[in-house]
Image (cartoon, rainbow, N blue to C red):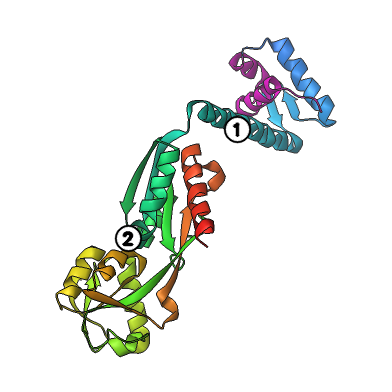
Amino acid sequence: MRADLTSFKLFVAVGEELNITRAAERENIVLSAASKRIADLEAGAGVALLRRHARGVTLTPAGQTFLHYSRQVLQTLARMEGELSDFTAGVKGHVRVHAIASAISEFLPHELNGFLARYPMVKIDLEEHVGPAIVRAVAERTADIGIVTENTPAEGLERLPYHVDRLVLVVPDGHSLADRPSIRLAEALDHDFVGSHPDSSLLAVIMRATMETGRSIKLRIQVRSFDGMCRMIEANLGIGILPAMAIEHQIASGRIRAVPLDEPWATRRLFLCMRELASLPVSARQLVQHLSASVKASA
């Protein structure tokens, strides 16, 4: 079959107007030329694409298929033209990222720095949210990219592996548990805890794990930031569970200690989530590719 873009555009107009005359007017083509183009498409396809009636046309099953692919051809061309113009002018755009706290603290600062150095005309809005809210924002198109843990339900979204987040028990220097080579959660539950804020995905993991031990956790104080939690632990207000990489600087101070948790849930896999990678704007798609490449480089 030989068909050009004018014919594809015309057929899409016919499929939407269900009238060759109105479609020809819409595409600024004289009626006789439009009718010939449609006839040529049918001859090339070897099958009738339209049923002609006195008041217009309807699509045959073959015509419906042809309409579907005509739209795809035009959409692909438009996307290609957009991407090529981005390469000419430099990738630019506005990317909305919603992520859990550990991703923001541990991985994104370095990775976003590298991305923005390469694409200085891209603006990024980064917001911290809990997993379910992130999934909802991506599904409702108020966020382009989300970063959640693997146990966050994300039905209907595309997911790509991101980093692995390891949780540790954090205690003040000199604490009775400070020199343990590793520890189970049940062994730590006799102590008071400093917890994260009530809506955090981290606290949800800890509460779920505590329930599985058949015991309860004694939350003495709850703090919104990881740094604030570390300061409370340093002040002997309790012990806590935190992502290891997010508190490397605080651990390096020597005033608090990290004890590995001997628990399967203490290793959390993070995922990038989006509605559909191929349909993202160029700037958002480039960011996903950059973050994915960062994971591979650190593996």
The disc, 1 or 2, on the residue closer to the chain's N-terminal end is 1
**What residue sits 61% from the left and 25% below the top?**
17
Residue 13 appears at what percent x and percent y?
62, 24
Question: What numbered label is drawn on residue 278?
Answer: none
User: Is the residue marked by circle 1 packed among few (<14), some (14-19), or many (20+) residues within 10 Å?
Assistant: few
Q: Is residue 237 left or right of residue 32?
A: left
Asked if residue 13 lies in the magenta stretch, the reply is yes
Image height check: is 297 above or below 183?
A: above
Q: Secondary structure at mark 2?
A: helix
Between 139 and 266, the residue placed more toward the observer is: 266
**What residue sits 48% from the left and 26% below the top?**
89
Nearer mark to the viewer, of 1 and 2: 2
Q: Amino acid at mark 1?
A: Gln
**What residue sits 76% from the left and 36% below the top?**
62
Question: What numbered label is drawn on residue 101?
Answer: 2
- Using the rendered view, name the quadrant where residue 37 is placed: top right
Q: Secondary structure at mark 1?
A: helix
Image height check: is 49 above or below 103?
A: above
- Using the rendered view, name the quadrant where residue 259 is placed: bottom left
| Residue beneath disc 1 | 75
Between 38 and 17, the residue placed more toward the observer is: 38
Residue 96 appears at what percent x and percent y?
38, 44
User: Is the residue marked by circle 2 packed among few (<14), some (14-19), or many (20+) residues within 10 Å?
Assistant: many
Residue 268 appears at what percent x and percent y?
43, 70
Residue 276 appears at what percent x and percent y?
53, 48
Q: Amino acid at mark 2?
A: Ala
Asked if residue 42 lies in the magenta stretch, the reply is no
Q: Which residues are magenta?
A: 1-27
Asked if residue 97 can be seen in this view, the reply is yes
Image height check: is 220 above or below 224?
A: below
The majority secondary structure of the magenta stretch comes to: helix
**What residue sits 22% from the left and 79% below the top?**
173
